[in-house]
């Protein structure tokens, strides 16, 4: 064999081993660095180009993955970061992401993760185990106090992170935790080369504001930050170093740009989407969905009703002890009476709420795990009953009686209270109006009190200065562990009586026991039994009166390939790297 | 003169209607008919199916169209006669006298929606009539409060002059310099946001009145400072009359004309202020009907897109009332001009 032939064979081997040929220079580069181990997606192979515009209901505040808490910032940051293990929003199961594979020890306490080789950040710098260790150091730092810090505590202690070698990281948990790999979802891996200095100087929480130079920001997501114009748009551009490819070996994402535009209200969002100024819309009310669906064909978009999701709405009463020294308000005795709460639940017309407020696109709820959460919902719970007659009988048993139109308690006091609701949430306000009417039917005078959302949360969780309130929860992970904060009596979001030093009732103590037990059960069937029991206890004792679970409603411009809206966040963009515009789409001129 | 009489007469009818809303309205304004959201106004028929005149006007009951949310068909099998002076839901006439007599209605538990329903299936006609009581009542009371406040401040400023005059007039100018809408919103935001409905009404009156006193005060002050130097006032003063007596007996009657015109001008402005606050959700709370809360729904895209035109009626009512008030103001103004 001539030397020339040998050289050609070697060159051919190098080119072929790594996919599409770029250039001879590229081949030399590959001689030095390991070939990148890309994740191959299974979606339809698409076309490159185009951009996707989506509206947000408020302006983003930061691009920092560690400190972003508000929804608009998180929506943007999510497109620029990658995690080790990711929960597939469609199947709701954990999958390999930046981690090529992982192993869990039999005792469930040691997770060893093998990282993908040859992956680069969006600025071209290599990614390795040092970035992982650094990231977890940041998230667990006490001074920074990121929201992820609580999530990364197992058995009361932070997860111990150790670099084994450049491509292997070991995580040690204080105790076995079911679904431990799910903890890693959306824990963004940070670039050590850009943030190490800021962290050492204690400035990391302030880093990566919206006015930061794009060149100083890098991530492992499908897009990278390009520009922010206050009040107008935030633009993300395609990350050329993204570590996923399609079935033909083409580097994802297909889209060139993502544009986020702030508008002030849902109505403004609807108008923009309708006029072609936005390509996607989500989290809209049923009435807007119906109004848009009427013009689908004519205006070139598709509206999809994905069926019941994970959100649920509920009414609850203030059962906190009065502040030290103050007398207990009369209402406290009513609110702590399980019979009273059950009567309120019987009086509420959930079908009416589903029909009037959601136009039928919601299901009445008996318990807190909606039917949309197929894996964990307790299907044996009896459906909710609407019976003002039974409600009145139950109240009579508990010592209440009717004086004309008004319900009075055993001491002759009229049963009257206010219901807090977020002033900007039209849907919850409508629910409050329907409930007000239902309660008037059994003689209870309820006042609807719209409140600015943050002021309302302050009253419910901190000052405890309220009587009743209506809230909605959900959207996060389907797994029961995502709601530990709500169901543990010591939890900060145990809404009706948060952060109890000791469980106040026997049934709350039982829930505590079951929730703690299921955390370390590794078998699904065992966990399901325990969680089913929790749902039964909650449905019987009614600490929160569950109302309805709305369907997930989304819309997107026609011609978007690989559009597979999911019930979990982000309903439209969870697979943004696979989204592409079909030939000739979108039809609206830009 | 006839114009003044006609306008006042018509306005009086409106106010009587508002006061007797319980009787005129067929149903309770808060009653939700959940099977009939966004029902359109029904057609009243006089000719029956055979083409002859029926003994009473009648409507056909509405039947929700299956598979839709807000579409209805007339059920030709079920005509409902409209009867007059029927017994229905209890109410208190003018808030005082309990009664169950209504001007009209249909038999039994059926419902007739002459002006359609809103999103909860509440009768728009009943809400319009009861809402008149709240919006017009609040406007009237707030205007009275504003004019009273303006009279007091203006007369003190005009009569005593000096420091009190300067203070009062600068305050009035400050209030007038700020666009009234923002002043209204700022004042409302500074006060407790959620109150029992009765308290909310009083607060509304107070807030709107507190924004409207400036112009009456200015005008009253001008009149009083002129009248103060007139002979009969000087004479009264020198014969030992107290300041209060002079103000009440001699000075203020001169300002009555101005005060009345200002009052007539202010009432529609105060009604609009109440409607504006309720429109933004800062006025009366559910389920109390105010013309403002009824119009607030029109801000939502899906309501405009679906063209529920009957929800627009409170706007027409407001325009009609305003035209009557401006007609009165105009006539009063002309009388004042003629007199002086």
Image (cartoon, rainbow, N blue to C red):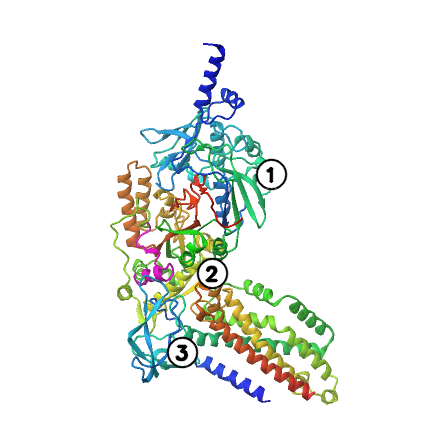
Residue B61 lies, with reference to residue A298, above or below; the image says below
Viewer-side label of 2, 3: 2
Viewer-side label of 2, 1: 2
Residue located 57% across and 80% down the image: B325
Marks 2 and 3 belong to one chain = yes
Residue B246 lies, with reference to residue A337, above or below; the image says below
Confirm whether the magenta stretch covers residue B172: no
Task: Pinpoint the chain carrying mark 1.
Answer: A
The CA distance from mark 2 to mark 1 is 39 Å
Residue B328 lies, with reference to residue B121, above or below; the image says below
Confirm whether the magenta stretch covers residue A365: yes
Q: Which residue is mark 2?
A: B301
Left or right of A231 on screen, residue B89: left
Q: Mark 3 and 1 residues: CB-CB less than 8 Å, in contact?
A: no
Q: Which residues are magenta?
A: A346-369
User: Considering the numbered disc 3 on the image, is that residue within a helix, a strand or a loop?
Assistant: loop
Task: Pinpoint the chain carrying mark 2.
Answer: B
Tag count in the figure? Answer: 3
Left or right of A16 on screen, residue B231: right
Q: Quadrant of residue A101?
A: top left
User: Considering the numbered disc 1 on the image, is that residue within a helix, a strand or a loop?
Assistant: loop
The CA distance from mark 3 to mark 1 is 65 Å
Q: Position of residue A39 (x, y in %)?
A: 42, 31
Query: Is the residue marked by circle 1 packed among few (<14), some (14-19), or many (20+) residues within 10 Å?
Result: few
Task: Pinpoint the chain carrying mark 3.
Answer: B
What is the number of the mark on residue A141?
none
What is the number of the mark on residue B25?
3
Q: Which residue is mark 1?
A: A213
Q: Mark 2 and 3 residues: CB-CB less than 8 Å, in contact?
A: no
């Amino acid at each position: 064999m001539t030397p020339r032939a040998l050289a050609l064979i070697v060159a051919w081997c190098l080119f072929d081993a790594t996919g599409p040929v770029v250039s001879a220079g590229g081949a030399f580069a590959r001689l030095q660095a390991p070939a990148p181990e890309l994740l191959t997606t299974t979606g339809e192979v698409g076309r490159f180009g185009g951009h996707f515009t989506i509206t947000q209901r408020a302006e983003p505040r930061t691009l920092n993955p560690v400190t972003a808490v508000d929804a608009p910032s998180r929506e943007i940051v999510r497109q620029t970061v990658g995690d080790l293990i990711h929960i597939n929003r469609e199947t709701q199961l954990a999958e390999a992401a930046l981690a090529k594979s992982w192993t869990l020890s039999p005792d469930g306490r040691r997770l060893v993760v093998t990282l993908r080789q040859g992956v680069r950040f969006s600025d071209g710098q290599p990614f390795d185990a040092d970035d992982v260790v650094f990231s977890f150091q940041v998230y667990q730092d006490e001074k920074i106090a990121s929201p992820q810090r609580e999530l990364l505590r197992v058995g009361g202690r932070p997860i111990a992170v150790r670099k084994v070698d450049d491509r292997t990281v070991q995580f040690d948990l204080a105790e076995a935790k079911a679904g431990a790999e799910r903890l890693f979802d959306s824990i963004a891996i940070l670039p050590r080369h850009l943030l190490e200095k800021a962290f050492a100087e204690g400035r990391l929480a302030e880093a990566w504001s919206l006015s930061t130079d794009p060149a100083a920001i890098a991530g492992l997501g499908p897009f990278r930050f390009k520009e922010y114009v206050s009040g107008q748009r935030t633009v993300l551009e395609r990350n050329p170093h993204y570590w996923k490819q399609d079935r033909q070996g083409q580097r994802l994402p297909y889209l060139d740009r993502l544009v986020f535009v702030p508008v002030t209200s849902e109505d403004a969002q609807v108008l923009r989407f309708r006029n072609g100024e936005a390509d996607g819309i989500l989290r809209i009310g049923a009435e807007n969905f119906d109004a848009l669906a009427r013009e689908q064909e004519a205006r070139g978009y598709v509206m999809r009703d994905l069926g019941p999701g994970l959100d649920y709405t509920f009414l609850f009463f203030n059962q906190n002890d009065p502040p030290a020294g103050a007398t207990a308000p009369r209402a406290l005795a009513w609110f702590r009476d399980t019979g009273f709460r059950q009567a309120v639940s019987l009086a509420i017309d959930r079908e009416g709420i589903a029909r009037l407020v959601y136009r039928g696109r919601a299901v009445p709820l008996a318990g807190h795990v909606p039917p949309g959460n197929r894996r964990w919902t307790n299907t044996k719970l009896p459906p909710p009953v609407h019976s003002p007659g039974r409600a009145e009988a139950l109240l009579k048993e508990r010592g209440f009686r009717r004086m004309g139109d008004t319900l009075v308690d055993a001491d002759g006091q009229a049963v009257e209270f206010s219901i807090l609701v977020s002033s900007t949430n039209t849907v919850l306000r409508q629910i409050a109006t329907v409930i007000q009417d239902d309660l008037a039917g059994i003689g209870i005078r309820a006042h609807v009190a719209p409140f600015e959302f943050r002021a309302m949360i302050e009253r419910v969780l901190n000052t405890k200065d309220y009587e009743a309130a209506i809230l909605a929860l959900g959207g996060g992970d389907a797994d029961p562990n995502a709601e530990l904060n709500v169901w543990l009596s010591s939890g900060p979001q145990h809404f009706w009586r948060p952060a109890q030093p000791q469980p106040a009732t026997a049934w709350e103590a039982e829930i505590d026991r079951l929730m703690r037990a299921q955390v370390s059960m590794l078998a699904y069937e065992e966990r399901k039994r325990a969680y089913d029991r929790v749902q039964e206890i909650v449905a019987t004792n009614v600490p929160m009166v569950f109302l309805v679970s709305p369907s997930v409603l989304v819309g997107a411009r026609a011609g978007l390939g690989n559009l597979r809206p999911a019930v979990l966040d982000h309903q439209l963009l969870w697979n943004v790297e696979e989204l592409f515009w079909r030939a000739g789409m979108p039809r609206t001129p830009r | 003169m006839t114009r003044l009489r006609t306008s006042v007469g018509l306005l009086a009818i409106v106010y009587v209607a508002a006061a007797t809303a319980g009787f005129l309205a067929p149903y309770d304004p808060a009653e939700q008919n959940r099977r009939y959201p966004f029902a359109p106004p029904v057609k009243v028929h006089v000719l029956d199916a055979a083409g002859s005149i029926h003994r009473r006007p009648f409507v056909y009951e509405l039947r929700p169209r299956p598979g839709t949310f807000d579409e209805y068909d007339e059920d030709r099998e079920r005509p409902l006669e409209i009867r007059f002076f029927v017994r229905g839901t209890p109410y208190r006439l003018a808030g005082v006298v309990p009664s169950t007599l209504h001007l009209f209605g249909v038999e039994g538990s059926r419902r007739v929606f002459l002006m359609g329903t809103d999103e909860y299936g509440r009768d728009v006609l009943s809400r319009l009539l009861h809402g008149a009581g709240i919006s017009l009542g609040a406007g009237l009371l707030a205007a009275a409060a504003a004019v009273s406040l303006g009279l007091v401040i203006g007369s003190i400023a005009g009569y005593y002059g000096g420091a009190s005059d300067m203070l009062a007039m600068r305050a009035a100018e400050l209030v007038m310099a700020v666009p009234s809408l923002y002043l209204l919103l700022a004042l409302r935001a500074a006060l407790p946001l959620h109150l029992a409905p009765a308290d909310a009404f009083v607060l509304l009156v107070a807030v709107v009145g507190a924004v409207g006193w400036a112009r009456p005060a200015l005008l009253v002050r001008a009149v009083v400072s002129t009248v103060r130097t007139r002979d009969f006032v000087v004479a009264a003063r020198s014969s030992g009359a107290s300041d209060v007596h002079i103000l009440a007996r001699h000075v203020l009657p001169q300002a009555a004309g101005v005060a009345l015109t200002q009052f007539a001008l202010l009432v529609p402005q105060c009604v609009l202020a109440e409607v504006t606050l309720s429109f933004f959700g800062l006025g009366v709370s559910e389920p109390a009907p105010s013309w403002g809360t009824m119009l607030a729904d029109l801000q939502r895209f899906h309501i405009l897109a679906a063209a529920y035109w009957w929800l627009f009626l409170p706007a027409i009512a407001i325009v009609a009332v305003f035209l009557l008030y401006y007609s009165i103001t105009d006539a009063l103004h002309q009388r004042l001009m003629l007199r002086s």
